[in-house]
Structure formats: C-alpha cells, structure tokens
Image (cartoon, rainbow, N blue to C red):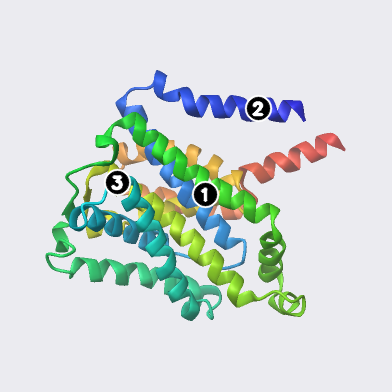
Amino acid sequence: MKKKYIFWVIIALAAVTIPLFSGPYQMSVLRTVLTYAALAVSWDMLIRSGQLSFGIAGFFGLGTYISAMCSIYLNMPGIPAIIIGGIITCLIAMALGTIILRLRGMYFAITTLALGEIFRIIIRNGGEFTGGPEGLIIKKLVFDGGTIPTYYLALGILLVAVGASIYFQKSRFHLALTTIRNNERVAMTSGINIYKTLIIVFGITAGIQALAGASFAQMYGFVTPESSFSGDYTLLPLAMSLLGGMYGTWGPVVGAFLLGILSEYLKLYIPYGHLIIYGIIIVFVILVMPQGILGLLKKKFRKEAV
C-alpha cells in the first residue's frame, strides 16, 4: 500500500515540476497530450454504459466556439469563457440526449457522428457571427498564451476528467452503468432509471469534452470549423482508450501518453495519412489485445501471483 502512495506522489511531482525542465515545444506537445487524455477518459466514461459515441469532435468543437464567442462578443476573460463553454455544451448534450439516447448500438453511434457534422455545418454557415469558414480570432488569450500556465490549465482539465471518472467508478454509477451495459432488462428490474442515468453521463462527458475544446481555443487564439471539428478529436481519443484499456480511468490516460507522443511524429512524417495509422492501431488492438495494455499487465501479474 505504501508503494502505491509513493508511486502516485512521484507521478504528481513529475506532473507539477516537468515545466521546469522542458522547452516551449515539449510543453506544447504535453498540452496536446493532456487534452487528448481528457477526451479519452471522457469517452471511456460513456462507453462503460455500452453507448458507443462518435460525437467527441462535435462537443469539442462546440466548446471551442462557445468560449471564443464569449470572449469576443461578451469580452469575457479566458477561464470563465472556458467554464461557460463546458456548461452550455453539457446542457445542449443533455437536451439532445433526451432524444438520441433512446437509440442503441450503431444507430446511436451514427447519430452522434452526424451531430458533430451538423454542428460543423451550422458554424460554417453562421456568417459573421461564427466567422463562417474563416473562423474567429481571440485577441486576448488565457494567461496570454504562456506555455507553462496553459500547461497547468490542460493538466487541471485532465484532473477534472479523472476525478469524474473515479467518482463514477466508486459511486453507484459504476454498478448502474455496468448493469446497463451488460443487460438493460436486468437494470430495469433492479430499479435503475436507465434513461436518466444515460442522460446524466452523456451530459457530463460532453461537458468535459467541451472544456478541453474551450481551453484549446483559448490557448491558441483561433477557431475554424475544420480545425475545431476535426476527426482527430474523435478517432484519436477512441484509439487511446482502446490501446490503454477500456472501462477504467487509467487505461485511457496511459494510451493517451503513448499514442499522443507517437502522433506528433506521425504528423511530421505522414501529415496526410496519420489517421490511417490510428485506424490500424484500433484494428490491431481489437484483434490482438482487446483488454488493452493495462489489461495485459493485470493478467500477467495475476498469473505470477498464482
């Protein structure tokens, strides 16, 4: 037990002190990895209920635009704009969830994918208000765009995602989501309000994805329909969660750091084909190690213990 605490203390110290030993490029990469880690954890929180969502990019993009418009039109500081972006997106997701969460399986997955495209088209055709295809420019960046303070901002959003995930694992939501995923009839007979539970989880995960998007917009100072609603924000977090191991908090985080760093190199050497590599990784993990890296490690330690 003491070793476990020592391990987490070392991780915490590394996360806090790493800016002291890193340059601007490394900090930029780490900010991106932390953002993807938050997206991966949020996606995993929803998949625990058995609902496969391809709408990460849609809610990420909504967060970027809502926060950007709050800053531009309401002259709102960066942090409040980020929070407002997350809250409004959460409410939108819950409102949409009352309709689409009646769907299951691929019907739900395709609908969430379509929602992201609908959001992008609305933003793209929003005229001067949304900036149209050219997007919007945020003149006053959060923390003036400094790499170190914005790194801590990305770290803070990841901690929000991790905290929500751990709460879901430790609270009654864990049993409810697991039962819903395994057998909805059993969940209903157990007194679980499936509809209400799914709406809450859908809203919270969408809100986290919007927080990640809003912080991204405030860090870099511009938003466009193509960049904010990019397929990277859906495919990459999904691949990260699968690689690290689903149905837990730390699997997506491990996968995010491994694949996030790899993705930087892929973008340099395969700028127009890196998404193909992500797809290959997803297929490989599903076929060869469906439990992910953490699942394999747990299985190995159990065998050694026996």
Place of residue 43 in the rendered image (x, y in percent of width and height, measured from the top left): 51, 57
Three-letter code, disc 3: Gly
**Residue lying at 23% horizontally and 58% vertically, measured from the top left:** 69
**SS of the residue under disc 1:** helix
Three-letter code, disc 2: Phe
* Nearer to me, 275 or 208: 208
Residue 78 numbered tag: 3
Is residue 97 rendered to the left or right of residue 126? right
Front tag of 3 and 2:
3
* Nearer to me, 45 or 73: 73
* Nearer to me, 12 or 120: 12
10 Å neighbourhood of mark 2: few (<14), some, or many (≥20)? few
Place of residue 290 in the rendered image (x, y in percent of width and height, measured from the top left): 63, 53
Q: Earlier in the sequence, mark 1 or mark 3?
A: 3
Looking at the picture, does residue 28 appear above or below residue 238? above
Residue 161 numbered tag: 1
